Structure formats: C-alpha cells, structure tokens
Amino acid sequence: MSSGAASSLSLKVTDLNVYYGHSHALQGVTLEVPANGILAVVGRNGMGKTTLCNAIMGIVPAAGGSVHVGAVNVLGLDPYQISDIGVGYVPQGRRIWPSLSVDEHLRLAERKGGAWSRERVYSTFPRLGERRGNGGNQLSGGEQQMLAIGRALLGNPHLLIMDEPTEGLAPVIVDQVEELLIHLSKNEDVSILLVEQNLGVAMQVSERIAIMVNGRIEVELNSSQLAADKVMQQKLLGVAGGEDEPAAPRAEAPVDKPAPEYEAGALAQLGRSPNRFSYGNPLVGQHRPEDHQRMGIGKPITRWDHAVLPAAAAPVIVADAASEARGPNPVSGRAYVAGTFDTKARELNFVRNILVKRGLKTLSVDLSTSGRPSSADILARAVAQSHPGGLEAVFTGDRGTAVSAMAVAFEHYLTAQDDVAGVISLGGSGGTALATPAMQALDIGIPKIMVSTVASGDVGPYVGPSDICMMYSVTDVSGINRISERVLANAAHALAGMIRHERPVRQSHKPAIGLTMFGVTTPCVQLLTRKLEHKYDCLVFHATGTGGRSMEKLADSGMLSGMLDVSTTEICDFLMGGVMSAGKDRLGATARTGIPYVGSCGALDMVNFGAIDTVPPQFRERNLYEHNPQVTLMRTTVEENRLVGEWIGKKLNRCEGPVRFFIPEGGVSALDAPSQPFHDPEADRALFAALEGSVKQTAERRLIRLPHHINDPAFADALAAEFNRIAK
C-alpha cells in the first residue's frame, strides 16, 4: 500500500433494490469490496449490472437498502457529492462530450495534488496524447474508452466503479488495463468494483467474482473456482470454460430438451435445486456463441430452456465454428438484426436464422417500448440506457414519445459499437422510424437494409443522405407466409452477400474530394473536375438537399480530404423554405473536420419549389422561372441575399481549417447574367456585402473577390489553383 495521506475506501452494498416503474431491476443486491480489494461482477447484458453502478453513484434512485462507501451511507447523495468522497466512475457507453477535445475532458476532470495528472494519463494511453486536440466525436470507440478511464483516474479516486472498461479496446490495451487495475489496488490505495463482460479479464484481475442474474447476485466465489466450473460458466454466463473442450453439437431445429443440469458442486454453491433454476435471457443473453473469444474463454452453448421462450419467438439457430468460417470472406464484425421483438420476434428471428446459416455472427436488438419479455440478445432496456436522458426518457408511458426517444437511444447505441458489419431491420412506419436514424448515422459503405411497408412511397426522410437499401415488404410484416418468407429471405441473403462480398480496392492512391454542382453551375464544376482529377478522386454531389448532406456525411466519416463547395444553393432553400434544403447543419462538417475548404456563391440567386402550382401563395408574384414542369425557381431578393450572406459568414467563422470563399462579381449562376431572367446586380451586391461584413478574415479564412462570372473558365482556374495551395 502506498504511503499517501488518504487510504482506499471499502464498498458495502446491502439489500439494494431499484425499480424502473413497475420493473424490479435490482432485487436485494448485497456485495462487498474490501479496502484495496477488487471485486468483479459478471453476467449477461440486461441483468442489472449497469443499474448497480448507477445506483451506487446516485444516478438512479434506490427504493431500499444501503450503500456504504467507507463509513458513509451514500444513498440519497448527489453524484458530485459521492465523487467528492473519493469515488470515481467509468460508465458504460463512455459518456464522452462530442464538442470537447481530449485535453479539455481531462482538464475538467483533473484534481491537483494527487498521483494522477494529465501527463500521466497521456503516458498510460499514448494514443490519447496523439489525439489530445481531437473532439470526442472524432475518436474511435476504443479511444473514447481510454478517455473515459483516464477521466475517472484524474479525480484521484480511492474507490473506482468501472462498468465495462475494456469494451472496444484492442487486446494489447486490454492487457495494459489489466496491469493498471492490479497496480491501482496493490500500490495506490484504490479499491475497485469491476463490471466486466470479458470473463478472462475479470478472472485475471479479481480474486473474487460475483455473478449477477436477473437483478440478483446469484453466487459469489473465487476466480479459480469459477475457472474450474465450466458448467456454471455455461449456465450463468453463456460460455464454457476451456478451449480444450470439443465443440458442442449444433442446434438445427427447435429445441425441446432442457439444458443440462448443474453438477452437484455448482448446485451446492448456489444453494438451490435444479428445478428452481431460471435463465435471465433464455437465448444465451448478451454472450452469443461467437462471443467466446471476446469473453476470453469458452465455446458456444447450443441449448436453452425452451419453456421460457416467448411463444412468438422463432428459435435462434446457433452456429458452430465450422459454419462461422463458411464462405469466401470471413467477417470479423456482426450483423445486427434490430426491431420490435414484442410484435415481430418471429420475423426478426427468421431473418437472423438465415444470417447464422450463412455463417455470419449476429446480434439481435430489441427496440420495443412495451416492456414485454424479449428473446433478443440486447434487451430494450439496454438500448434505452444509451439515450442521453437515460431509461426514463424512453419509457414514458406514451407511445409517441417513447418511440421517438427509442430511435434516439438506438442511434447512440449503434454508433457506439465497433463491430457493426451490417444492419437489417423490418417493420411498418413506426418500426422504420425507429431503426433508420441509427442506420443513417453509420458510415457510408456499411451495409444497411430496411424491409418496410412504407418503402414504396417517399423514403427520403428514412434514407436521408445515407446508403440505406429500402425493400418493400409487399404484405405487412406480420407473420411468415408465402410472400413474407420470400421477401424476408431475399433481404437476409442480400445483407449476407453485402457483408461477405470482398469490396474491391481501387488501384489509386488519390485522395477524395467533394464538389457540389447544380445545373446552373455545371460548366464551372466540369472544368474543375478536369483540372483536378489527375491528382484527386473527384466526387460530385448534386446540390438538391440530399447531395449536400451526403457530401458532409462523407466528410464527417473521414472519407474526404477536402471540399470544393461551388454550389451552396441549398442554404437558400433552408432559409426561405424551398424544397431542396440540406438543413441547418450545412457547412457544419467543414467546421468539425477542419479539412481544406474552397466555397463559392453558386446558385445563391434561387430558391427551389416543385411544379408552378406548388409555389407557396406568398411567393406567387415573385420572379419565378419554370426550370421544367417539376421544378420552379424563385429569384432571391436583396434582403434574402443579405440574410444568406450573414448566415454563411457565421458558419465560416466556426471553421479552424483553411477556408477560401470566392465571390464571382459577374454573376452566381447561369441565370444570373446580363439578359438572363435572374440578373439582379443589386441583390448580388447585397449578398457580397453581407459576406464581407460577417466573415472574420484571418490568414486561414479568406474571402476572394473576382470580376468573373461563376461559369467563366478563369473563375474555375482560380478555384483550382487556390485549392491546390491550401490542400498541399
């Protein structure tokens, strides 16, 4: 033990009960972490482990019991008061602020005078030192996990609560965390409550392990005892105990046999008879057969207690090692099957079974808000905990708000996972609205399929700027019949093909850049492309609202090395109510990423509407131009141009990377030229003056006026030359 002034704190939890509404989440939990000791709590997801951590930290209220940290009963205290006592917390899901840099996170958490400083955190996790200026949303999942651990250590705690600290970390970093935890306990006066799904880590770090099942501590025993008891591992954790065991037989059909009973020694420790044993999640819980490597131990389990399966659930076929390796392209990630298991378990499990038969690792995720029992691997409560407002924000009792909140929670949940090889969902309008926001948030290129009853209509709100494949279900997603069986099977095989397909790598080392083009700026963008395509992979986006959003999504995903944003017309539609708006986040990726940006006023002279008879009544007397029978353009006024210029200026001022914004004094579109219907020098002058009055120019952020029309070759030459200068 170190000789510091403060000593480690013991933790004693006695008869702790927590409810979520009528759901009894923690049921009389009792455990103890001695001073300078480590206790590991393991169990499948949805068993109450995170609720235990949150209750100890005062994040969720307890209905009864006590939590003593040292001599202080902390129940009823606020989280900051518990932290002040000397308790640190590494929460599940990392809880990293996207807008703060790594160093800002650590500065906020640092308490001077203790053993831990920011430089020690950087020394412990060198990758954080390399990324200290990056925002939270620019870190990988593993880097975010390192940051969450470092942030907790900077409070110099004497009791550390850690919920899944090794989740998302590379094996070499996991080993490092193991050594760190042992060192903290033995040498730095820190007691540790470790919640961990990686059984190998838990047994390596802690001499004692508590197994949680259905909100209770089912058994507490020595790590060596658990390591030797393979039956207990299989029963309570969904893994077997050693790599030397033969693979269990594969379950090819609905299982009608009960799981093997406990051996006498294991039953004696549990103090209960075989017929009183019940599973937490009957289908292997969070630890599917393919998870045995992540758990650090074991083989697939292939049988479960069939009696406790929901009646509507199709049996999940568990793949053996041979089936996982089947196919030309082994896949390291998982296929996520998401939907409302309270109403569509049979259909979702049908899809999952096909994916498993194709040799894919799968993970089923319940998005229902009814609170009914579920056969999914990830329970709805586990997803809901990812909502910024927690469980209470999702389970409101009102279906409309609950569904909207669950969509937000699923987006946060899915984007936090590091193993998404693809995702498929199925449902009606509600199910589609639940699943597609999370799909949109995934990087371009990750396979995404939505089987939906609304897929034959306007799917723009569901697909957005992403590459979601929408498949019409033909019949309602309700049961397996001659039509739905074929449609769902096609969707499942399509996802399997996308995931397994070996994506060709282009034989080119040219960086990709994004360019925006509209019909009235086409000559400029075509010239630019010809000038730059010898050294850049030029991706041209049609500035129709979705085009701008798609370009910025690629930038946020790290797939663009720069932007030539010639056609910023979508901003006019956003501000004036046109039909081709890219939303309020237009130019947001430029600020977030800091990539080289060259922009211009392309088509800021117009707002887009549909057919002439769809133009809003208040605009019917304006300068309108029928581009074609489906598209009507409206000339922007002096005041509107002033508004657009100021809006762009504010956005550009947030950019820290190199920015050049060009002003074409000769006109901003093919329609804005002498003798053309939108030629209005006064409106253009208002736009240019507003830009000059609002953009704060620096060495890196400049406005450049040129006496050319936007489609003049000289203007394209200038754009290309300046981009080459700032992009080098």
Image (cartoon, rainbow, N blue to C red):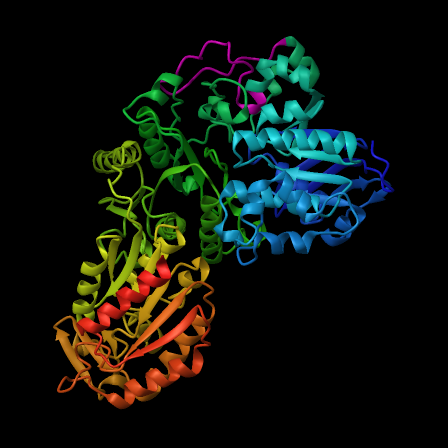
Q: Which residues are magenta?
A: 235-263
Quadrant (top left, top right, bottom left, bottom right) of the N terminus: top right
Taking 368 as reference, is 630 above or below it?
Answer: below
When asked about the image quadrant of residue 353, the answer is: top left
Left or right: 265 as drawn, with respect to 129:
right
Q: How many marks?
A: 0
* Quarter occupied by the C terminus: bottom left
User: What percent of the width, then of the height, locates residue 284?
Assistant: 49, 26
Judge by depth and name the residue closer to the eye, 164 or 268.
Answer: 164
In the image, what residue occupies the spot 64% across and 29% down? 178
Identify the residue shown where x is 50% and y is 44%: 383
Q: Quick check: 231 above or below 20?
A: above
* Magenta-span inclusion, residue 240: yes
Q: Is any part of residue 90 visible from this angle?
A: no
Identify which residue is drawn at 32% across, 33% down: 351
Residue, x 53% and y 13% (percent of image)? Answer: 260
Left or right of 681 in this view: 372: right
Give residue 720's position: percent from left, percent from top: 26, 64
User: Is there any visible trace of residue 581 in the rendered image?
Assistant: yes
**Left or right side of 268 for 496:** left
